[in-house]
Image: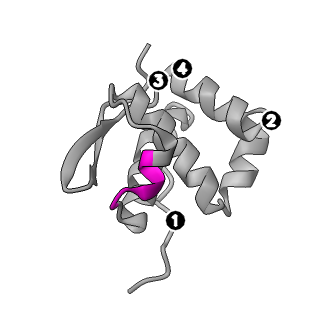
Amino acid sequence: MTMTNPVSIMINGETHPLRLTLGALAEIEEALGGDMESLKSRLANPRIGDLLLILNALLRGGGVSLSLEALKAADVDLAAATVAIAEAFRALEAPGKPPAPPASSGAA
């Protein structure tokens, strides 16, 4: 079951789809531990490793077979990855609630 429309990200000069599927969500919960509420708290200030795990799960949800090691070595814009991950997670917002704005990267 797909929970969102696809979001795209550029990796090594190629565009790849990201999808938050139930499988991707379960993988993220398992990799980072805890339930959705504890994940929300942890992701308020994520580590780079957390972002890589999430990005990898979302890539697999989008049908892209890329190992975590290959992703670590890939050319990926961190700011673009953060925005794409936030867009993929918008499906978890409460129905009828306006989506939260993406977190600021601090860059102007």
Q: Residue at x 43, y 65 (%)?
A: 78
State the SS at label 2: loop
- Label 3: which residue? 21
**Camera-side mark, 3 or 1:** 3
SS assignment at label 3: loop
Residue carrying label 1: 103
**On the rendered image, what quadrant is the N terminus found in?**
top left
- The residue beneath circle 2 is 34
In the rendered structure, which amino acid carries the disc numbered 3?
Thr
Q: Residue 70: in sight, yes or no?
A: yes
* Eye-nearest disc, 4 or 1: 4
Label 3 – label 4 distance at C-alpha: 5 Å
Question: Going 45% across and 30% down the picture, which residue do you hit?
Answer: 20
Q: How many other residues sit within 10 Å of disc 4, few (<14), some (14-19) or many (≥20)? A: some
Q: Residue at x 67, y 59 (%)?
A: 44
105 relative to 20, above or below: below
Identify residue type, mark 2. Gly
Image depth: mark 2 or mark 1 in front:
2
The answer to whether mark 3 and mark 4 are in CB contact below 8 A is yes
Secondary structure beneath dot 4 equals helix
Mark pair 3, 1: CA separation: 22 Å
Q: Which residue is mark 4?
A: 23
Q: Which residues are magenta?
A: 70-75
Amino acid type at image mark 4: Gly
